[in-house]
Image (cartoon, helix red, strand yellow):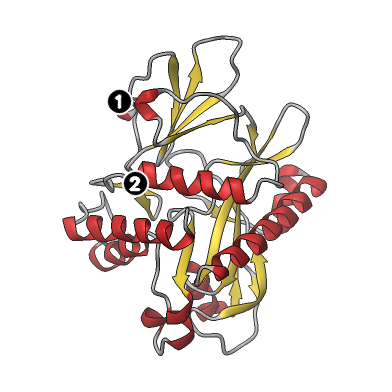
């Protein structure tokens, strides 16, 4: 698997690089009294658990802008945002965050059936093992939003869809219920906001951590074009085919191109310039539509 390396992280005076994920780089302050974390969003793009090349120019700034906006809309849900001045070098694509104990659960909420959920439904009539009514079509709204957690695998391994019962085994019954209920509540609030802007929030994923007092806090990115599927509501209502219904404002362009041009064996191919440009355009259009 292609993964970020130590060398991909930039040098930032006063901050020490501690970790690189698929898209984000984390830094700790060189001041021992400062426990905040600097979360820097890169222009890297990932699909199917691979970091692809080239990146999407300006993506880090766009995703950070969107996350900041959503954190503000969801301010009554505890989050990881910390106060302070950002280093000039990364001011447009970074956030200061509290240091949290991150939970190993990716909290996926699905309001509509598509993607891997649609593939499973076609085969088994279920999504992540949850039985669904017969006769659903790709892109249909689900009877109610589903909480479908995944286990966040160590770097270099694939995340694994898990049952709620497995979530309980990993984090305990009380915390698992809190993750489920909070994720569904955030999704409901965000979906309503998106609907006011003529958008459908088809699905999304959240990550959470706990602070020193044990409070659950929304962390990482939130409701970005990378972590969510956004569709045009009018196209969904009037579209006669799945592709027409699901006019998207996310990295679906990248997913579709990869699915058509790569058999998931070996290293993935480089993204064509037009795919990169169209993806960046869709990210910008989403921000404009939301007024973020």
Compared to residue 109, the image places residue 210 above or below, namely above
Name the foreground residue: 84 vs 115: 84
Outermost residue to the left: 273
Which corner quadrant of the image does residue 277 belong to? Answer: bottom left
Residue 64 rendering spot, x and y as whole percentages: 45, 42
Outermost residue to the top: 32
Residue 88 rendering spot, x and y as whole percentages: 38, 24
Q: Which residue is mark 2?
A: 59
Outermost residue to the front: 291
Which residue corresponds to the image point at 66% horizontal and 61% vertical from the top-left? 189
Quick one: label 1, few (<14), some, or many (20+) residues within 10 Å? few
Compared to residue 280, the image places residue 113 above or below, namely below
Compared to residue 144, the image places residue 99 above or below, namely above
Which residue corresponds to the image point at 56% horizontal and 73% vertical from the top-left? 112
User: Taking the image as drawn, is residue 170 in sight?
Assistant: yes
Q: Which label's residue is closer to the chain start, 2 or 1? A: 1
Outermost residue to the right: 174
Q: Which residue is mark 1?
A: 7
Residue 195 rendering spot, x and y as whole percentages: 56, 70
Which corner quadrant of the image does residue 82 belong to? Answer: top right
* Circle 2 SS class: helix
Numbered disc total = 2
**Quadrant position of the N terminus in the picture:** top left
Labels 2, 1: front one: 2
């Amino acid at each position: 698997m292609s993964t970020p390396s130590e060398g991909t992280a930039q040098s930032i005076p006063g901050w020490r690089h501690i970790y690189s994920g698929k898209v984000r780089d984390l830094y700790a302050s060189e001041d021992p009294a400062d426990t905040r974390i600097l979360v820097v969003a890169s222009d890297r793009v990932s699909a199917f658990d691979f970091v692809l090349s080239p990146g999407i120019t300006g993506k880090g700034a766009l995703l950070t802008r969107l996350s900041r906006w959503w954190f503000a809309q969801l301010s009554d849900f505890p989050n990881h945002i910390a106060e302070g001045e950002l280093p000039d070098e990364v001011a447009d694509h970074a956030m200061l965050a509290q240091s949290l104990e991150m939970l190993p659960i990716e909290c996926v909420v699905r309001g509509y059936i598509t993607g891997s959920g649609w593939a499973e439904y076609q085969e088994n009539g279920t999504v992540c093992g949850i039985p669904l009514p017969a006769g659903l079509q790709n892109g249909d709204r689900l009877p109610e939003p589903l909480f479908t957690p995944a286990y966040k695998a160590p770097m270099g391994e694939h995340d694994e869809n898990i049952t709620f019962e497995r979530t309980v085994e990993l984090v305990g019954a009380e915390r698992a219920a809190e993750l489920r209920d909070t994720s569904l509540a955030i999704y409901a609030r965000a979906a309503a906001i998106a609907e006011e802007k003529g958008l459908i929030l088809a699905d999304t994923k959240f990550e959470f951590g706990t602070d020193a007092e044990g409070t659950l806090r929304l962390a990482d990115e939130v409701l970005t074009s990378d972590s969510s599927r956004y569709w045009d509501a009018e196209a969904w209502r009037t579209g006669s085919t799945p592709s027409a219904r699901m006019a998207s404002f996310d990295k679906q362009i990248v997913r579709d191109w990869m699915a058509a041009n790569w058999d998931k064996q070996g290293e993935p191919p480089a993204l064509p310039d037009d795919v990169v440009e169209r993806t960046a355009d869709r990210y910008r259009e989403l921000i404009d539509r939301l007024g973020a």
